[in-house]
Image (cartoon, grey):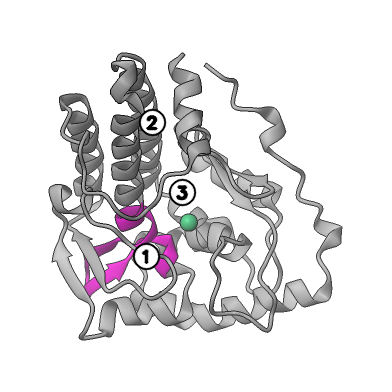
Amino acid sequence: MPAVASDLFIEQRYERYPAENQLAWQKLYARLQPRWEKYANHRFLRGLEALHLSPDRIPRLDEVNRRLQPLTGFQAKAVSGYVPAFVFFDCLRNRRFPATVTIRPSTKLDYLPEPDIFHDVAGHVPMHADPHFADTLARLGECAHTAAGLAAGMPAETRLKTLTSIVRAMARFFWFTIEFGLMKGRGGLKAYGSGLLSSYGEIQHAIEAAEVQRYPFQLAWVVNQSFEIDHYQPLLFVVDSFSHLYELVDRLERWMREGKLDNVAPGEPRIKEEDLQSFLEVAK
Ligand SMILES: [Fe+2]
């Protein structure tokens, strides 16, 4: 298996952030804070506190990790951009979270097609301070090894098609849980998905807007449901609890082994060649 490349990770050159970057962080944090209190899952709020993220400055990853690692073993590791799918999941399995360290311009706080440090560190990392969530994420990372192992045993003529289907199912699962998941909570629905937690507009929209369709999580639906990334999500899935989420990851892996992910519905997301290759390399 390929070593998770040590050259995947970069240094966070903290002195390179200009004042404009710090301003973007301050604005983003100040806008989100009251919405987190209202709409975020309580374990996210606990994670924010445990990690001492500052409203005033971009976090230094080594400081975050000093607090995070003793809690769950997770660390946020700086990367420069795109990480191939298998490598990304393998990082999660090893409790390393690839984090973008750049930040959006302070004049464009709302729309962001690519992750930035606010999404990755303010949106994702507080959840990693929760032991139950951390176990779930690492378990989801293990599923990529299961997929690579299965791909190795597939007939060559159908391998690519079947693997594409499995990786698409994993991407959809990730999207509707880790990125856009809602959970029943004290006082109603709360967001635990990081795409919601890092978006001032969408966190409120996801919970309040009448036009959003919110359904109890159904695995057969989710793995077959396409999604688009460039607008607010019209359809979201609700889990009961963190134990429920963990069980769903277990079921996802079982379905993978049983071949139930081999022919999921076509459509978004499109699976890139490099993502498939990252699984096939490990399957050799
Ligand atoms: Fe994300």
| Ligand 1 contact, mark 3 (Cβ < 8 Å) | no
Q: Which residue is mark 2?
A: 144
Q: Amino acid at mark 3?
A: His
Extreme residue toward the front, this view = 157
Q: Which residue is mark 3?
A: 128
Q: Which is nearer the N-term, disc 3 or disc 1?
A: 3
Q: Amino acid at mark 1?
A: Glu
Q: Amino acid at mark 2?
A: Ala
The disc label shown at residue 228, or none: 1
Q: Kindly state the secondary structure of the residue where label 2 is placed.
A: helix
Q: Residue at point 70% right, 47% down?
A: 62
Q: Residue at point 28% right, 58% down?
A: 226
CA gap between label 3 and label 2 equals 19 Å
Query: Which is closer to the viewer, label 3 or label 1?
Result: 1
The disc label shown at residue 220, or none: none
Q: Residue at point 65% right, 28% down?
A: 5
CA gap between label 3 and label 1 equals 26 Å
- Using residue 202 as the reference point, say whether residue 187 is left or right of it: left
Provide residue 119's location: percent of width, then percent of height.
54, 63
Mark 3 crowd level (few <14, some 14–19, many ≥20, 10 Å Cα): many
Mark 3–mark 2 contact, CB under 8 Å? no
